Image (tube, rainbow, N blue to C red):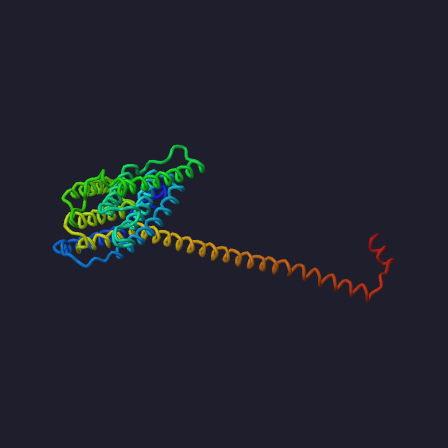
Amino acid sequence: MAHDETKSAATWLDLPATPHQKWSAFAVAGVVLVGLGAFIPFARKPLAELNAFFPSLDAIVVVTDLITAVLLFAQFSISQSRALLALAIGYLFTALIVIPHALTFAGAFSPTGLLGSGPQTGSWLYLFWHIGFAVSLLAYALLKGKTLQEPTTISVKSTITGTIVAVICAVCGLTWLATAGAKLLPPIIVNNQISPFVVYPVGLVILISTIAIAVMATRRWSTLDLWLMVVAFVSISEIAISGLFPTVRFSLGFYASRVLSIVTSSIVLIVLLAEITRLYLQLAHSNAMLRRERDNKLMNLEAMSAAIAHELKQPLGAITLSGEAAVRYLDKTPPNFDQARSLIKT
């Protein structure tokens, strides 16, 4: 059964999760759950305004999500899985929309933020960020097992290029909506307080992420499915502690949610790098075994050649010695042709 599952896997990401991986995933989720329970009672506690802290965290998210997107696009080019394409789009979207989120953060690069941002810009970009990522997780769960129709190298490249262009356009459009078009959106921050309206977009993110977890949990867990469920759970914890519990910016919950955003963006990247390293070690081990086997075969061939040469040298040596003895005998004894003729006649 395990052999059949391995054969049916499109890539190593589709292989069944091992017991060790399951325990590791449950441990990470447990640590986050315990930490969430410890932070919730103090989530509303106001802390110092460290404006430079958030762009630094956003920079980490940009790098980790961008590397994850590149690795997922590479896996998509091999398997042509629509689910991996949707997931790669989600990570790319997150990496790109975090850039204007960092630039428009009030007090980081300017008192009001760059790009003509207003008091609502950062909050709405944060919500767009998490809604888009939650949608990509749900799309991955729903598209699992579906591939492109008759894929070719050209179609795969054009698909990746087209999706990247579409994501860039979407990020630019949402950035414009959160800056110049902010009047079209309901206010999230009112008098430096988080508006009660935030419950609706936060609830939407939690609902979409929960559905994604439920869909992935109903089928055989692959390595990627397992860790994406953990990512979805951490993302729910992050958006909940950021939007549901604190009522002011720069509260303990506000800071804790940004730390969780790094955890959310790093989990899949760490898993990808760990699995790639494991596969590389297996490949290196296999190559070493092949080299040893080749060396053993060469040693056996050399031993066989030496044995054959030894067996051939004995009769050849005897023939050579007999020939040399005959030559020496003929050199010492002149030939008697009359005697030879008489022997022939008889």
The image position of residue 231, as x and y in percent, is 25, 48
Say which of 135 and 180 sits in front: 180
Left or right: 285 in relation to 246 = right
Visible residue check, residue 158 = yes
Q: Where does residue 223 sit, x and y in percent of width and height?
A: 30, 47
Going 82% across and 53% down the picture, which residue do you hit? 344
Q: What residue sits 71% from the left and 63% below the top?
A: 321
Farthest-out residue, right: 338
Relative image position of residue 46 (x, y in whole percent) = 15, 56
Image side of residue 44 versus residue 94, left or right: left
Residue occupying the far bottom of the picture: 332
Q: Nearer the viewer, residue 211 or 345?
A: 211
Q: Nearer the viewer, residue 149 or 296?
A: 149
> Most extreme residue toward the left, as rendered?
41
Query: Going 35% across and 48% down the picture, which residue do you hit?
Result: 66
Measured from the top left, where is residue 44 in percent x and y?
Answer: 13, 54
The number of numbered discs placed on residues in the rendered structure image is: 0
| Camera sees residue 246 | no
Q: Residue at x 15, y 54 (%)?
A: 43
Nearest to the observer: residue 153 or residue 191: 191
Quadrant containing the N terminus is top left
